[in-house]
Image: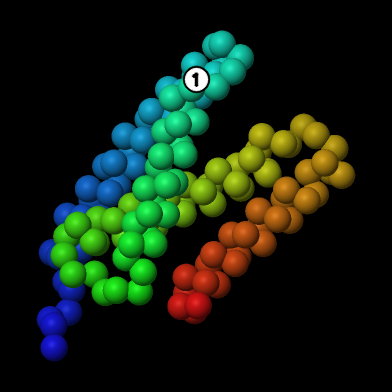
Amino acid sequence: MQPALTVTHLFPPIAAATIVNAILFALMWRGHQAERAKGKDPWWLGLGLAGYCLCAAAFAYAQGQAPARGYLTLFGAALFGEAFGVVVTFVLVQAFVVMRGRPWRERAFPAIASVAFTLALFIGFFTGR
């Protein structure tokens, strides 16, 4: 039987994943500022976001149901989990902040769908399904 994972095992890969996500967030913020200045998204912003999502999906596909065996796997799992946090935050901000000035009939579906998506993720994560 393998020993249980302790905080000393979990802290380095989760901290590294958080640092990577903070750097990616800073780059996305820079892209947002460039979008505001020029009126359109910079090409590298969409490419970076697509690459981030593809890397997270590739890790999830490759890892499957296998248990975490080392720091690299824990790093990938933390990065994947934080990617879901980015997606949930983006969806909620779009539905409730960005669309705030529009009429309710335009905001109703995005608001309800974003809350349903968030609840589905939480239910899936906490029930293991």
In percent of width and height, residue 9 lies at 15, 65
The kind of secondary structure element at disc 1 is loop
Q: Could you tell me which residue is drawn at 38 percent across and 28 percent down?
A: 27
In percent of width and height, residue 116 lies at 67, 62
Q: Could you tell me which residue is drawn at 30 percent across and 47 percent down?
A: 18
**The one of 10 and 48 positioned closer to us in this rendering:** 48
Q: Name above or below for residue 35 compared with residue 11.
A: above
Image quadrant where one finds the N terminus: bottom left
Q: Residue furthest bottom?
A: 1
Q: Is residue 120 left or right of residue 13?
A: right
Q: Is residue 84 left or right of residue 21?
A: right
Which image quadrant is residue 74 in? bottom left
User: Mark 1 highlights which residue?
Assistant: 42
Q: Is residue 10 left or right of residue 50?
A: left
Q: Residue type at mark 1? A: Pro
Q: Residue furthest top?
A: 38
Q: Is residue 11 left or right of residue 33?
A: left
